[in-house]
Amino acid sequence: MVSPKAALIAGASGLVGSHCLQLLLQSPRYSKVIAVGRTRLNLEHPKLQQVIVDFNDLEKHRHSLIADDVFCCLGTTIKKAGSKENFRKVDYTYVVNLAKITSTHFATQFLVVSALGADIHSRIFYNHVKGEMEEAVKKLPFTAVHIFQPSLLLGDRQEVRFGEKAAETLMKATSFLFNGPLRKYKGIHAGTVAKAMLEAAKQDGGGVLVHPNEQMLQYA
């Protein structure tokens, strides 16, 4: 029998991360779940260990970031970040630094939420940064790197993003149109992405695996 593992999750207060955290705590695969964040979560659980960090100086916390499987759900928007520079800091720098540090502690798998359209060659800033992040983590010495590329994320957010809320409402009303070749653009619930992440981790595979939106929808 395989011994229970330790999981680490960053971004557990976010839309995908909150669902992912609950699944990790429920999973018999993990005996310990390390939640890494800037503030303490209002949650207690026998498996849960919370590590409060400054993501601008993650290196000083490296000895608290030891786990087998790393789930990275960090992400923001340019509007919320306040500038392109701050957006890149969260969606590229924080993610890549977490990956580098955990890889040096021999973490086996790195599972990260990216986005549909991520492409290092894209002229769209958001997609370009996501593409840069993907290329950076692919090069690190994990046994497996899993990259999840959801379309518009659906679910209840802690903060209201009016543009995204309007898009979500429209996406739900027209979801019947997103079949066949258009299925990859269909909105996806954050909980479905989280399920896809846990299922991928359980395979204990190797290499770089990209999980497109239409593939993740099977867990809806």
Image (spheres, rainbow, N blue to C red):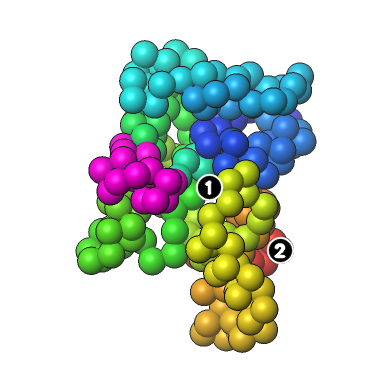
Amino acid type of the residue tagged 1 in the rendering: Gly
Q: Name the one closer to the observer, 160 or 75.
A: 160
Magenta portion: prevailing SS class: helix
Q: Residue drawn at (67%, 52%), measured in percent from left and top?
A: 156
Q: Where residue 117 sits: x, y (%)? A: 38, 66
Q: Where residue 90 sits: x, y (%)? A: 37, 39
Number of residues whose C-alpha sits closer than 10 Å to that of mark 1, classed few (under 14), some (14–19) or many (20 or more): some
User: Between marks 1 and 2, how big is the CA–CA gap?
Assistant: 23 Å
Pick the quarter of the image with the N terminus: top right
Q: Earlier in the sequence, mark 1 or mark 2?
A: 1
Q: Residue drawn at (49%, 15%), measured in percent from left and top?
A: 64
Is 31 located above or below residue 132 in the figure?
A: above
Q: Quadrant of residue 22?
A: top right
Specify start and end residues of the magenta stretch as a single range: 76-93
Amino acid type of the residue tagged 2 in the rendering: Ala
Kindly report which numbered mark, 1 or 2, lies closer to the viewer in this rendering.
2
Pick the quarter of the image with the C terminus: bottom right
Q: Which mark is residue 205?
A: 1
Q: Is residue 147 visible?
A: no
Would residue 102 be found to the left or right of residue 92 on screen? right
Q: Are marks 1 and 2 in contact (CB under 8 Å)?
A: no
Q: Which mark is residue 220?
A: 2
Q: Residue drawn at (44%, 64%), measured in percent from left and top?
A: 116
Q: Name the one closer to the observer, 109 or 50.
A: 50
Q: Is residue 152 visible?
A: yes
Q: Where residue 151 sits: x, y (%)? A: 51, 65
Q: Does the magenta portion include 125? A: no
